């Protein structure tokens, strides 16, 4: 068993990279066939579901670490930019998570109109939005800051509070709320 673990870490370089692997990424590893691959991928899904359950039990304001952990698992090491919305009820508990946009390595188009439409459809009272930076650097760009301002102002028109905008890297996270920018 330790031989397989060593092979996995050698192939992927880190546990984080292994958790983001697709079934094809496990091909050719000694001792890792279809059944073992399915088990490893199931572990990741169980971890994600556990974090979602945790976020639905109590207000997300009380557990920002759980939100960041969940988002790092969800989008932290994707090879392209992804924008996700976490829709919250009036007590800031998770209603649902939705990927609203997918881009390239360095850019992505986000449409505030679509985000507002989805917030209304989910009957959300609050939202946390997040996107990843595939480079791993979590410093927000000027366009990230402008988007946060537009989303905050637009959502306010329909009484939805933008709780935070997070920039997710593989190992780090930047919070607009903690920086006083949201």
Image (spheres, rainbow, N blue to C red):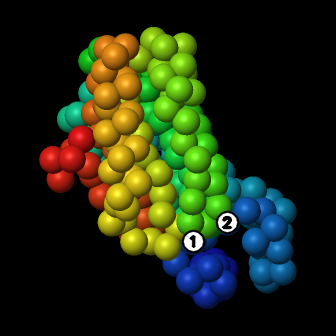
Is residue 18 visible to us here? yes
| Residue at image coords 52%, 78% | 14
Left/right of residue 142 with respect to residue 102 in the rendered view: left
Is residue 20 visible to us here? no
Left/right of residue 6 with respect to residue 122 in the rendered view: right
Would you name the residue on which mark 2 appears? Answer: 21
Relative depth, front residue between 96 and 110? 110
Pointers 2 and 1 in contact (CB under 8 A)?
yes
| Residue at image coords 41%, 40% | 129
* Figure quadrant of residue 94: top left
Callout 1: 10 Å neighbours few (<14), some, many (20+)? Answer: some
Relative depth, front residue between 137 and 108? 108
Would you name the residue on which mark 1 appears? Answer: 17
Secondary structure category for the residue under label 1:
helix
Residue 81 percent across, percent down from the top left: 57, 58
| Residue at image coords 75%, 56% | 38
From the viewer's perspective, is residue 144 above or below residue 93?
A: below
Residue 139 percent across, percent down from the top left: 33, 66
Secondary structure category for the residue under label 2:
loop
Relative depth, front residue between 175 and 3? 175
Left/right of residue 136 with respect to residue 19 in the rendered view: left
From the viewer's perspective, is residue 179 above or below residue 156?
A: below
């Amino acid at each position: 068993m330790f031989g397989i673990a060593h092979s996995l870490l050698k192939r992927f370089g880190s546990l984080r990279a292994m958790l983001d692997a697709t079934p094809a990424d496990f091909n050719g590893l000694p001792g890792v066939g279809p059944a073992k691959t399915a088990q490893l991928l199931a572990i990741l899904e169980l971890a994600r579901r556990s974090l979602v359950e945790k976020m639905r039990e109590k207000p997300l304001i009380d557990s920002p670490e759980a939100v960041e952990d969940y988002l790092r698992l969800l989008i932290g090491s994707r090879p392209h930019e992804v924008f996700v919305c976490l829709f919250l009820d009036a007590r800031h508990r998770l209603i649902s998570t939705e990927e609203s946009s997918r881009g390239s390595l360095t850019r992505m188009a986000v449409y505030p109109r679509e985000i507002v439409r989805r917030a209304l459809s989910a009957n959300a009272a609050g939202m946390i939005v997040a996107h990843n930076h595939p480079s791993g650097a979590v410093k927000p760009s000027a366009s990230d800051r402008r988007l946060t301002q537009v989303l905050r102002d637009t959502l306010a028109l329909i009484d939805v509070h933008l709780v935070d905008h997070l920039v997710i890297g593989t190992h780090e996270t930047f919070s607009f709320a903690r920086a006083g920018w949201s």
